[in-house]
Image (cartoon, grey):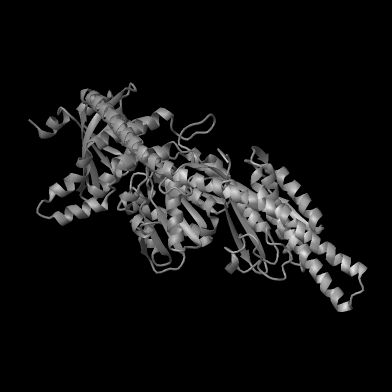
Amino acid sequence: MKKSVLLRNNVKISGSGVQPMLFAHGFGCDQNMWRFVIPSFEKDYKVVAFDYVGAGKSDLEAYNSERYSNLNGYAQDVLDICSELNLRDVIFVGHSVSGMIGVLASIKAPEYFSRLILVGPSPCYINDSSYRGGFERKDVEELLDTMDRNFIGWANFLAPAIMKNPDRPELGRELTDSFCSTDPKIAREFAAATFFSDNRKDLLKVGTPSLILQCSEDIIAPLSVGDYLHAHLKNSDLKVMKATGHCPHMSHPEETIMLMKEYLDAA
Amino acid sequence: MQTDRLLDNAPCGYLVFQDNGIIRWVNTTLLTFLDLQSTQVIGKNIETLLTLATRVFYNTHFFPLLKLHSKADEIFLQFRTSGNIDLPALVNAERKQHGDEYLNHCVIMPVHQRKKYEEEILLAKKQAEHAMKENHQLQELKASLEKNSLALESLYRQQVAANESLLQFSKIISHDLQEPIHKIQLFADRIVTKEKVSERSQQDLRKIDKAAERLRMLTRALEHYIRIDAEKSVTELDLNKVIRKAETQAHEQRKVSDYELIVDHMPLIDGVEDQMTLLFFHLFDNAFQFRDPTRKLSIHITAVSLDENLYRLSPNRYRYAEHIRITFRDNGIGFDMHYKDYIFKILKRISPSDHGLGVGLGLIKKVVDNHAGTIEVNSIEGSGTTFTLTLPRRLHTM
């Protein structure tokens, strides 16, 4: 590895505990997504947060289309970080597609992980005979199209914050840093890698115990998907949250934290 | 004229929703666009007005952007009318505090015509990008092909020369070396049986015979090691059968019978049957040889399928394909992990009391290399050894 993994993945370590908690963001954002949740775990854990290569403040030079058009390429980021920091007994917390990325990583190197906490995970987004993933192929194609359209004027996504306070450029920079800035080409490849993935056959190979945090009314991962995961992941707990939508760690951080602590305390 | 009436009938849609998505206010223009009554919209979730794909985008991009940034401009979203017709629109949104709650205000502008232009622009952009990318890739490929073909030529030349010397070497050890060894044994034996020699000399002669015997075994093993590459026909193998066959061979050779073998479900895998059998033979042989005399030997073999990168030497190349990871675990005496890189070298033995020839693990490594795989070993002294082999499910060429 040429560049340090810690720089490459913008790894941030905080907290005063010993057992590592590794926070992996989902599609569409970066480690900032965890900012409402992380402080509650800093007292008892060693908190490690990072950006996947291509997201947030990761090293975009390290992005490789061949590698990151496959969730295994993302799982390798997780394993690289575990290896670089020599982590053991990791509680992996993954949102959305990071649920399956964590599943893949735990199959490849079970020795790193003690628990998986999967927030809004789905092993397959597209419906397939009796399996209900929630999407048809054409829906995924429309999503990619919507992304293309919004990224035509990508500069507009980032610019207003800076333009709004021309006399205070540092504010603009802070705002730009703090939200989910992603290169449009990379975001689109991540979307395709995510929404066309099918990891159903991998679930039975997982030995690490897991908690599935299932939102009510989540179109990206509907209830039927949570049930499917619970039925196919050995030693899994399923909690259906009051939180709606797909980002409970942002919209309902208190409930998310409470359920995570409840699970970890019982373990 | 009242300003809210102006807004109600303004030539653009207007919508106010809470952070949880619930719609608080909508203007008449938007209701007309969507062909809905206000009672069908107020109190409902904004997501009910969007197409499925746009709901995903709303959840993963639009709302996080708005929440973190308090503003989102010129976002393309696809609404859906009551008649199930797509309504493409551009949206400007702002998140504002009203008393102790936040409300999100959106201005919605249908873009039927613009969408068509954009489609054309996007198509042209994609075609241009595709052509650029292909051109770029072709240039890169051409450059690396030229570079690689020279390197390949040089490698090929070296390989031919190496093969030639290996062939000679193989001939020497299988024939030329056997002859003098045979003679040493023959004459030593003749002296012992025919001549009257002292007790002391008899002992020495027996030692000569023993050493010659060991030399003979070693040359056999070396020959075996070189010959292994001769058989190259790849077929799809039933690992279960391969393992049972190897077990039988190892069991007959070492005469070990008091052991337990657990083999989990084994998948099919591409490989050279003789080589794979030999690989498992040596794994069993190793387990038998280094069993712990104080407890019953137990061997556990598992397999799991996972996707790994096929490129192991080329930097920055990735092609994930199915691999089979096999673990072979015993509860033998184990060894000090200090030796872990040493044991796979041919003719290396860890301790002088080890009666094997030290060829086994070197052969295992060679078979794994031939099958484009990797092998790792983990051992705890006193509790056992685990070999982990990761082999491609399909072999393209050998």
Q: Quadrant of residue B136?
A: top left
Q: Position of residue B295 (x, y in %)?
A: 76, 66
- Up-down: is B109 above or below B350? above
Determine if residue B284 is in view.
no
- Answer left or right for B333 relative to B192: left
Q: What residue appears at the point 74 percent right and 54 percent down from the top-left corner?
A: B261
Quarter of the image for the C terminus of chain A: give it.
bottom right
Q: Quadrant of residue B105?
A: top left
Q: Quick one: A113 or A132, which is closer to the camera?
A: A113
Quarter of the image for the N terminus of chain A: give it.
bottom left
Q: Quick one: B131 or A108, which is closer to the camera?
A: B131
Q: Quick one: A47 or B294, which is closer to the camera?
A: B294
Q: Quick one: A222 or B394, which is closer to the camera?
A: B394
Q: Position of residue B62 (x, y in %)?
A: 29, 41
Q: What residue appears at the point 16 percent right and 56 percent down from the top-left corner?
A: A170
Q: Quadrant of residue B72?
A: top left
- Answer left or right for A179 relative to A227: left
